[in-house]
Amino acid sequence: MTSALRNHLLSLIVVPIVWLSVGAPSGILAQATAGRDSAMVSDLKRLVRRANPGLRARRAAVAAAEARLQGAGALAPAVLSAEVEEVPDGLDLLDAGSTRLDLSRDLRTGGRRAARRLVAGLAVEQVRLELALAQRALDAQVDGLLSSQLGNYAAARRLAAQDSLLLEIAASLTARFAVGDARYVDVLRIRTERLRTQGELVGARTEALAVRRALGALVAIGDSTSQELGARIDSLALRPDSRPWPREFPPAPALDSLVAASGPVVLAEIATREARARASLASAEMGTRLAATIGMQRFAEEGGGHALGPTLGVSLTLPFTAGGANRAARAAVEHDVAAAEASQQEIAARTQASLGAARDRYESAIARLSLFDAALLEGAADERQSALGAFRTGTLSLLELLDFERALVEAELVSGRSRVAAAQALQTLLVGAAELPRSETRAPEATGGDR
C-alpha cells in the first residue's frame, strides 16, 4: 500500500472525527433554543434550510464533488493504434508491405491514481464541511432574528398594555375635569404620556416588521415555501407566551473548543492536508511510468504473399532526463505546503482573537442580565393595580402614578432587551465559530483518468 493511499484511508477516518468536533458548539445552540417553542422553531429552521438558496448551492457543490470523486484516479483507457507502410500506388491497402495493429496500456503509474483520489476526496470533505458550517450559521442567524422579532413583539405588547392603562386614566381625568375635580395640566400630562408611549409602540412594531422581512429574505424570492415561512413566523411571533430565549442561559463554551471546531480553523487544516496531497501528486507525476504493448503485424514475404505475427513492446519513461524541471516542480509544491501551514497558523490566531471577543461580549450580556431580579419585577407588576386604586381614591397623585408606571415599564423593557441581547450575543458567538473564509470558492480540479 502506497503512502498516498494510506493517507487517503486515514482521511476517511478523520472525516467523522472532524464532523463531530464541528458539531460540538451546536449543543450549546440547542440549549439556547430549548423551551416550549422549540418544536415550532425547529420546523421553521427546517423550512428555511430547505428553501435557502445558499444552502441549495452548497448541496449542488457537494453533489458535483462527489461525482468527480467517482471518476478520480481511474485507470486511463487502453490505446489502440494502427500503422500501414509501403502501400502500392498509395491506395492498395491489401498489398501493403507492412500492416500493424497494437493495443497498449499503462502498467505502472507511480502512485498517481491514489494521489488523485486523495485530492478529490479532500475536495469532497471540504465542500461537505462548508455545507455543515453554512447550515449551522444559518440556524444561528434564524435564532438571532427570531430573538429580535419576538423581543420587539413582547415590548410592543407591554407598551400596548401601558397605553390601555393610560387611556383608562385619561377617560377618568376627562370625566373629573368636566365636573371641576381635576386640573387641565393633568389632562395635558396624560395626553403627552400617551403620545410618548404610542411613539415607542410604533417603533417596536416597525422593528419587528423589519426583522420579519429579514427572516423572509432567507429563502429565495418567489419560492413556493415563502408564504408558508411567513405564516409560521407570524404564528410564532403573535403568541403571547412565545419565548425565544431560555430561562437560564448556558455558560460560555471554552475558547479552545470553540477555536478548534470553528469553520476557518477546520477548513485551514483541510487546505493544509490538500496542499500536502498535491505535493504527493506532483511527486507521483514525476515517477517512472511503465506501459506494455501487444499487437499483430502483417508483412510481405520475399517470395510473395504475406505473413502474420504477434508484436510485443514495453515503454519506460526516464525521469532523470528532466531533472531540472522536476526539481523546480518539487520546490514549488514544497512552498505551497509551507504557505498553507503558515496560513493555518495565521487563521487560528485570528479566529482565537475574534471568538475571544465574541465570548467576552456574551459573558458581559449574561452578567448584565443577572442584575435583573425577576421576582422583584413580578412584585412591582402586581403593585400596578394597587397604585391605580390609590390614584382613583386620591391618595396617589397623577405624577406619582405616571412615574411609577414609567419606571416599571422601562425596567421590564430593559430586562427584555437584555435577554434579547444575551440571545443575540450567543448566536453571534456561534455564527463566528461557523463563519466561512472569504476566499472559499475555487475552480474544480480535473479528476479524470490517469493519462
Image (cartoon, grey):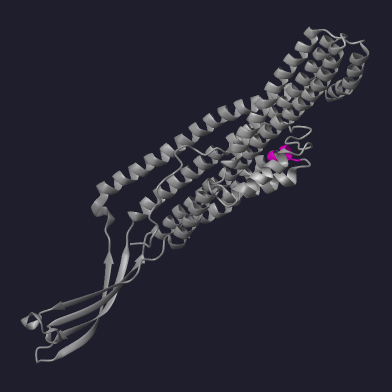
What is the quadrant of the C terminus in the image? bottom left
Q: Quadrant of residue 294?
A: bottom left
Residue 324 percent coordinates (x, y): 25, 46
* Residue 183, placed above or below residue 146: above
Residue 428 percent coordinates (x, y): 62, 32
Query: Which of these two is toward me, 153 or 289?
Result: 153
Query: Which of these two is toward me, 75 or 39?
Result: 39
Q: In this rendering, does residue 371 appear at all? A: no
Q: Main secondary structure of the magenta part?
A: helix
Would residue 356 be found to the left or right of residue 408 on screen?
left
Would residue 264 be found to the left or right of residue 176 on screen?
left
Bounds of the magenta segment? 29-34
Determine the residue located farthest toward the front in the rendered image.
179
Residue 38 percent coordinates (x, y): 74, 43
Query: Which of these two is toward me, 328 or 436?
Result: 436
> Who's the residue at 46% across and 58% down the image?
69
* Residue 166 on the magenta span: no
Determine the residue located farthest toward the left in the rendered image.
89
Residue 162 percent coordinates (x, y): 78, 23
Query: Which of these two is toward me, 362 or 303?
Result: 362
Q: Quadrant of residue 398?
A: top right
> Who's the residue at 7% across and 83% down the image?
88
> Who's the residue at 26% across and 49% down the image?
323
Q: In this rendering, does residue 70 appear at all? A: yes
Count of numbered labels shown in the rendering: 0
* Residue 293, placed above or below residue 2: below
Would residue 272 be found to the left or right of residue 375 on screen?
left
